[in-house]
């Protein structure tokens, strides 16, 4: 999808991509972007070093010795040249009427040295004057899975992406893309924007907010140049779709020398927290927290309140799941009398319990009709806002491994529940001693959009954040 | 005195920190409830101002060189009559001269003695990334030790004022504990929004503390005020 008229639209939907300054033996950037060529995009190389050219041509990519020789304007360029060459490349890109470029090149202001600062100033001025969409520098640039444009050969090419991600850090951009994809949260568009000398988080956020492919947005950032604009853009974006902000570098420096009490308490962490709340954004502190809350927001109904029904398999786990959800600030209420009456008709209380949490392994005994019956009763309970169910690697893996059709039946029962229920739902499957097996079946949950967590704590925190979002 | 003339006068003296009388005069102009405060330069002036205000009153030293008025013996509370006001005036001047020799002493502020309430702090500062931001918290040790405060970016909408009060951990204290009546949350919201509007209208304000504001079952009153303005006109 495109956002017609937006200044980033051409760059985010490229038909012509140029890789400038790639080098053997790996030709990393050309290889990263081969899917773009395979999808029918025009992929060019610009390299004047004679000894690199045969290797480039061996990849089937047409090389030009100068940007000026390119037969058409570039929509997105990857710039991987030494820093002193960067201004010349930028000049050629502007002359080419290129829509934008990601400058992988580093060694600018982030070094703190004079030449780096000076070169960054020069790039900034040139790009601003020409209204050129410079991504970075000192960044991994764009990852556009629909187009086949990638910042790493490890990230998938897919048209299924629903998650937009913006990252000041290149590592976090790639890591998030990999982990999100592996957790059933494919990327729609991702930008690693580094030093953000021209385009800042607000520019990308504005595009993702308007982009219909993107249903949810994540941001990793450490700071912002124009905080006012970010505040206003984040507020507008959060009104349209969930925005999850993982703020890095949160430790407040020591007390400031100041004349007022307020100023001495206004550490960056406290101010960011308040700002994010005010915008209706979701605040997280780590990659895992970001992935976890996105799983809930993208795949589950929103919790309508704090009252959890917890469905555990055994007595010990009933206590642990209660502790985890209680600690996250959620409530574990009594069910209604009607629920108790219905459960009492068939629940096996020998070695089990139908308080909240349910201790239900002995009752279900692998029978999906019984699980379905329990889910229907709990779902109808007026005291329940959301449901989390434990799956036990210990019990289930024994059965699922030998009879894969029983896993399929479980998934089908859970999917059917999620389809008819208006309440938030998630599952917990601790890998226990079956890490490899659990990893192998997790994609089945992701494919069915069933939120799956590896621990009670992570499921509880994700539910609490989803609730805070629902109540924003 | 209007905002512009107060700020111009302070800048002319090379000050960015407004004194309490100036700060409260700005609050009054903005319609933010605060205890009345006037500047007296003689004991007789203090007496006639106290007469007009009604007893009991509070006297506080006004000096750009004395930041911690209580520590300098520069605050006298609960003065019930003319004699007490005259004695307190002389004592404050003597204490101030002793505690901070050479300090510029403009005089003494005469203020209404507010009846006690739940102490909260309403503040504003200029954040390097987000510009003007507001702070709310419980006053006294809650803010000193526990740093139980919440922030919002100016301008605040009514819902922001409400949610920043809800955000503090000590909120149950405002809801009323152990038979105490609940504080007037609506009045606190209105003070917060009043400050948000004030600082939005006057970008010269860099920092502002209303500490404490007394929260009552009916109403809220800023008892101490401190405003820092920028050096040059902005």
Image (cartoon, coloured by chain):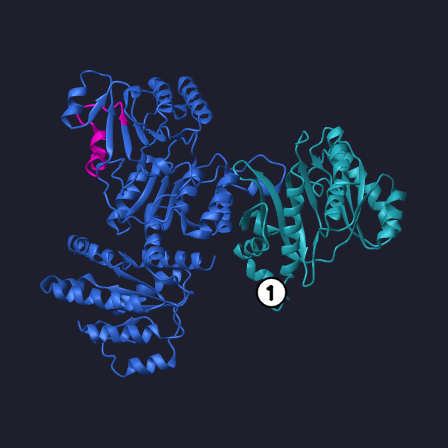
Question: Color of chain A here?
Answer: blue
Question: Which of A196/B132 is in front?
Answer: A196
Q: Look at the image and say whether residue B112 sits in the magenta stretch.
A: no
Which residue sits at x=35%, y=35%?
A11
Question: Which of A19/A396 is in front?
Answer: A19
Which range is magenta?
A19-39
Give the chain ID for the cyan colour.
Answer: B
Chain at tag 1:
B
Q: Residue furthest left?
A: A402
Circle 1 residue: B176
Q: Is residue A77 left or right of residue A251?
A: left
Image quadrant containing the N terminus of chain B: top right
Q: Is residue B127 left or right of residue A191?
A: right
Q: Up-down: is A411 above or below A286?
A: below
Q: Up-down: is A234 above or below A379?
A: above
Q: Look at the image and say whether residue A23 sits in the magenta stretch.
A: yes
Q: Quadrant of residue B175?
A: bottom right
């Amino acid at each position: 999808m495109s956002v017609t008229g937006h200044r980033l639209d051409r760059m985010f939907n490229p038909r012509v991509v140029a890789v400038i300054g790639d080098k053997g033996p790996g030709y990393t950037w050309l290889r990263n972007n081969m899917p773009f060529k395979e999808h029918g995009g025009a992929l060019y190389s610009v390299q004047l070093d004679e000894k690199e050219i045969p290797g480039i041509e061996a990849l089937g990519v047409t090389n030009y010795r100068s940007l000026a020789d390119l037969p058409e304007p570039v929509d997105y360029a990857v710039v991987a040249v030494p820093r002193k060459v960067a201004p010349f490349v930028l000049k050629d890109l502007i002359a080419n009427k290129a829509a934008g470029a990601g400058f992988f090149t580093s060694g600018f202001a982030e070094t703190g040295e004079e030449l780096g600062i000076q070169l960054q100033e020069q790039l900034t001025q040139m790009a601003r004057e020409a209204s050129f969409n410079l991504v970075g520098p000192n960044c991994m640039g764009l990852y556009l899975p629909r187009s086949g444009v990638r910042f790493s050969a490890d990230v998938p090419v897919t048209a299924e992406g629903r998650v937009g991600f913006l990252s000041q850090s290149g590592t976090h951009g790639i890591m998030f893309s990999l982990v999100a994809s592996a957790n059933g949260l494919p990327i729609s568009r991702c930008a690693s924007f580094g030093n953000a000398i021209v385009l800042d988080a607000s520019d990308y956020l504005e595009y993702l907010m308007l982009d219909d492919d993107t249903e949810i947005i994540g941001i990793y950032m450490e700071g912002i140049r124009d905080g006012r604009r970010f505040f206003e853009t984040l507020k507008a974006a959060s009104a349209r779709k969930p925005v999850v902000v993982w703020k890095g570098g949160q430790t407040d420096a020591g007390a400031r020398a100041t004349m007022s009490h307020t100023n001495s308490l206004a550490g960056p962490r406290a101010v960011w927290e308040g700002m994010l709340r005010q915008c209706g954004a979701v605040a997280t502190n780590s990659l895992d927290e970001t992935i976890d809350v996105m799983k809930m927001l993208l795949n589950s109904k929103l919790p309508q309140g704090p009252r959890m029904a917890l469905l555990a398999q055994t007595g010990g786990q009933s206590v642990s799941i209660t502790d985890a959800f209680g600690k996250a600030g959620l409530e574990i209420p009594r069910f209604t009398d009607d629920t108790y009456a219905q459960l009492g008709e068939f629940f096996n209380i020998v070695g089990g319990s139908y308080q909240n949490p349910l201790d239900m392994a002995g009752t279900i005994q692998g029978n999906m009709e019984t699980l379905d019956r329990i889910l229907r009763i709990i779902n109808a309970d007026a005291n329940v806002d959301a449901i989390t169910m434990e799956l036990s690697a210990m019990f289930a893996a024994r059965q699922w491994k030998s009879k894969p059709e029983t896993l399929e039946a479980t998934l089908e029962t859970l999917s059917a529940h999620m389809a008819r229920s208006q309440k938030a739902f998630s599952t917990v499957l601790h890998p226990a001693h079956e890490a490899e097996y659990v990893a192998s079946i997790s994609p089945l949950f992701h494919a069915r959009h069933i939120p799956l967590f590896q621990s009670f704590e992570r499921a509880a925190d994700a539910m609490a954040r989803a609730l805070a979002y629902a109540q924003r | 005195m209007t905002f512009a003339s107060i700020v111009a006068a302070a800048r002319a003296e090379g000050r960015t920190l407004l004194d309490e009388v100036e700060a409260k005069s700005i609050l009054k102009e903005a319609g933010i409830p605060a205890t009345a405060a006037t500047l007296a330069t003689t004991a007789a002036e203090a007496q006639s101002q106290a007469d007009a205000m009604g007893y009991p009153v509070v006297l506080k030293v006004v000096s750009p060189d004395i930041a911690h008025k209580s520590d300098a013996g520069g605050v006298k509370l609960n003065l019930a009559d003319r004699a007490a006001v005259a004695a307190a005036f002389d004592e404050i001047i003597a204490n101030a001269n002793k505690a901070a020799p050479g300090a510029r002493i403009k005089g003494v502020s005469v203020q209404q003695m507010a009846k006690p309430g739940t102490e909260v702090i309403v503040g504003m500062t200029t954040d390097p990334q987000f510009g003007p931001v507001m702070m709310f918290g419980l006053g006294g040790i809650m803010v000193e030790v526990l740093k139980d405060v919440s922030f919002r970016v100016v301008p605040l909408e009514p819902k922001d004022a409400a949610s920043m009060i809800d955000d503090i951990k000590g909120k149950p204290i405002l809801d009323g504990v152990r038979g105490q009546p609940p504080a007037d949350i609506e009045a606190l919201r209105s003070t917060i929004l009043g400050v948000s509007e004030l600082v939005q209208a006057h970008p010269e304000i860099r920092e502002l503390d209303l500490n404490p504001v007394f929260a009552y079952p009916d109403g809220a009153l800023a008892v101490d005020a401190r405003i820092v303005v920028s050096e040059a006109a902005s």
